[in-house]
Image: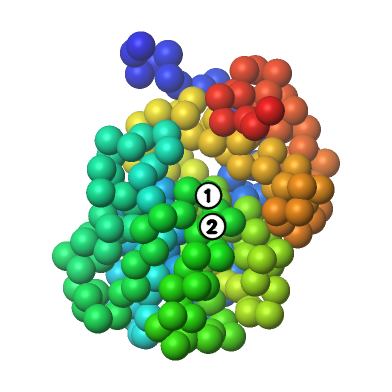
Amino acid sequence: MTDNQRAITEDQRQQARLIWDYHQMHHELRPVDVAIGLGSHDLGVPAFCAHLHRAGLFPTLVFTGGPNPTAPERFPRGEAVHFRDHAIELGVPDTAILLEPKARNTGQNITLSRAVLAAAGITPTTVLLVSMPYMERRSFATARKLWPEVEIVCASEPLEFDDYLKSIGDERLVTDQLVGDLQRVIEYPRLGFAIEQEVPEDVHAAYESLIRDGFTSRLIS
């Protein structure tokens, strides 16, 4: 399949950008007790964690994630292990990093990281979640459900939508992921996995239009 076949139309791009903007929480960065780098296929997460650690925003960093379910070959030793190694290469001291190498979904990222912190004698009141840009809102909703007593701040690598598309190199894949994460934002509250959040009408219309256009590979049944 050629790059052109993986491209999206201008109308689809506008709809995907609406969803992209909705997924980001636009929280103001500030010092917190700990940060959690959520596992994914994107090394932008540990790179941004390293940047924020150098800026003095937190003393302790947890990387969480087992093998990537959609691309296990990308991080064969697991997401958390590769993220830790990348952060150390970027100057984060090994002593500042805790490892959670088993989580297979966002809920486990939160609950197992909490357990790792507790085992280290750390009971935070403020937690920074660092994720891929389109995972901020779902991460926030999940953490608020599973860890309601802490204050959650969300962050991701500061990229514009078009720049992120270029960095991934597959416009259809990114759009599939945007649609899949929005479905989870909508559906997970009734399943008890996350808090409910309002979805604006224009965002919901863009979501339904992209589903009709076939961006369904990341939907849950």
Horizontal arrangement in the rendering, residue 137 relative to residue 47 (left or right): right
* Residue 7 to residue 189: above or below: above
Residue 36 appearing in the image: yes
Instruction: Assign a secondary structure to mark 1.
Output: loop
Quarter of the image that includes the N terminus: top left
Compared to 142, does 211 lie above or below? above
Report if the CB atoms under discs 1 and 2 are less than 8 Å apart.
yes
Real-space Cα distance between discs 1 and 2? 5 Å
Lateral position of residue 132 relative to residue 61, left or right: right
Pointer 2 residue: 108
Residue labelled with disc 1: 105
Disc 1 residue type (three-letter): Asn
Instruction: Tell me residue 8's x, y (percent).
Output: 51, 22
How dense is the environment of label 1, judged by Cα within 10 Å: few (below 14), some, or many (20 and up)?
Answer: some
Q: Which type of secondary structure does the marked residue at label 2 adopt?
A: helix
Residue 118: give x, y in percent of width and height.
48, 81
Left or right: 123 in relation to 98 = right
- Residue 42 visible in the picture: no
Q: Nearer the viewer, residue 109 or 176?
A: 109
Position of residue 26 relative to residue 165, above or below, is below
Rendered-image quadrant of the C terminus: top right
